[in-house]
Image (tube, rainbow, N blue to C red):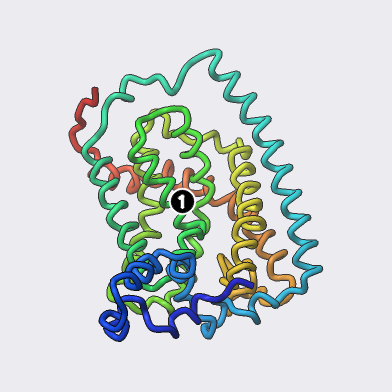
């Protein structure tokens, strides 16, 4: 295991007064460079994760599942995820190819216009996420930025900053089916480790904005249109990508650092399926949520007029972009 950053803090920091005057200039320079050593970088990454909080991580959390069960589950769900990606990509390519023969939805006159509302939303989202990143550096828990909700936030920042194109359409449809994590975060918030001023408030603001951005883009139209409600291939692609992301990147980093990234090492204390099979239960109900949640957001947006009226407030005069 690589959990060493906590022990790094026991030593005297290289910029301490105890060391500043007692050693010459030649020894001060190596110590200054030590600030950017691998140990300090790892300390910024996960040195502030406290294993004493249940579900945060630590040796007991990493050993919650037997190595045999963890390996078997990983092989099964990675295989399922790869198959879902391959099948859904094949079907999506067929559909896009058939549509491109008749029309070109990405080539729209409004592609050269940017609304002031979109820019204001981009600024607000960047400020919110920037504060969250600052909190992560201040608490030395930067590794938590790999959690899905933060990844989706970065995707949405890109969508607001990127001019309309086919790649933006792909990312927009994918993130529409990755919002179930935001719903769970709002319904079952985990804020017991957020101790800095306004850290809890930023938590809620960020997860609410995860819904505001796609609703605004849906209202904007153009390439920001969802697939038909009967088409579940984009949802299946998102599900497969989530399986691969969780059981490869998050799990491997979690085992190496003993940090419980998105509960891949051990279940949350509030998990109703707490036990050795919690990941199987989670894979089942999260698959259902991923397949259905994005469709429900689109359905509610289309059926409830208040969504459209509220987004109209952001449709401020647009400006030309050369």
Q: Where is residue 54 in the image (x, y as percent from the top left)?
A: 55, 82
Q: Which of 282 and 146 is in front in this view?
A: 146
Q: Where does residue 321 sit, x and y in percent of width and height?
A: 24, 26
Is residue 39 toward the left or the right of residue 69 in the image? left
- Picture layout, residue 266 above or below residue 81: below
Q: In this view, does 288 lie to the left or right of 75?
A: left
Write the residue at 41% across / 49% down: 154
For this view, does 184 lie left or right of residue 128? right
22 shown above or below 33? below
Which corner quadrant of the image does residue 264 belong to?
bottom right
> From the viewer's perspective, is residue 206 above or below residue 213?
below
Q: Residues within 10 Å of mark 1 (few under 14, many from 20)?
A: many
Q: Which residue is drawn at 34% across and 57% down?
A: 129
Quadrant of the image containing the N terminus: bottom right
Task: Identify the element where label 1 is drawn.
Answer: helix
Q: Please name whichever residue, 156 or 46, is drawn nearer the observer in this view of the structure.
A: 46
Evaluate whether residue 66 shows in this view. Answer: yes
Residue appearing at x 52%, y 42% in the figure:
174
Residue 241 x, y percent position in the rendering: 62, 47
Give how far across and how far down residue 217 sits, in percent: 37, 39
Residue designated by label 1 = 152
Residue 203 shows in the view: no
Q: From the viewer's perspective, is 2 left or right of 309?
A: right
């Amino acid at each position: 295991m690589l959990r060493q950053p906590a022990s790094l803090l026991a030593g005297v920091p290289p910029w301490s007064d105890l060391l500043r005057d007692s050693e010459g200039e030649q020894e001060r320079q190596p110590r200054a460079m030590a600030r950017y050593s691998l140990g300090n970088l790892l300390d910024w990454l996960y040195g502030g994760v406290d294993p004493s909080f249940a579900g945060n991580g630590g040796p007991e959390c990493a050993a919650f599942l037997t190595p045999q069960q963890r390996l078997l589950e990983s092989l099964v769900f990675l295989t399922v995820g790869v198959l879902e990606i391959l099948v859904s990509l094949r079907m999506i390519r067929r559909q896009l190819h058939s549509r491109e023969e008749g029309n070109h939805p990405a080539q729209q006159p409004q592609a050269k216009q940017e609304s002031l509302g979109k820019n204001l939303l981009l600024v607000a989202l960047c400020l919110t996420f920037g504060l969250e990143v600052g909190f992560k550096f201040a608490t030395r828990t930067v590794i938590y930025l790999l959690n899905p909700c933060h990844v989706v936030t970065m995707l949405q920042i890109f969508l607001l900053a990127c001019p309309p194109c086919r790649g933006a359409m792909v990312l927009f449809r994918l993130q529409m089916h990755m919002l179930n994590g935001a719903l769970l975060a709002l319904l079952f918030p985990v804020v017991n480790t957020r101790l800095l001023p306004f850290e809890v408030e930023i938590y809620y603001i960020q997860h609410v904005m995860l819904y505001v951005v796609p609703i605004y883009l849906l209202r904007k139209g153009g390439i920001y249109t969802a697939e038909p409600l009967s088409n579940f291939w984009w949802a299946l692609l998102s599900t497969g990508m989530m399986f691969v992301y969780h059981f490869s990147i998050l799990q491997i980093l979690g085992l190496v650092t003993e940090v419980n990234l998105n509960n891949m090492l051990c279940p949350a204390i509030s998990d109703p399926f707490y036990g050795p099979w919690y990941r199987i239960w989670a894979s089942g109900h999260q698959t259902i949520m991923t397949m259905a949640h994005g469709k429900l957001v689109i359905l509610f947006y289309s059926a409830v007029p208040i969504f459209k009226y509220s987004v109209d407030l952001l449709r401020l005069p647009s400006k030309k972009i050369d």
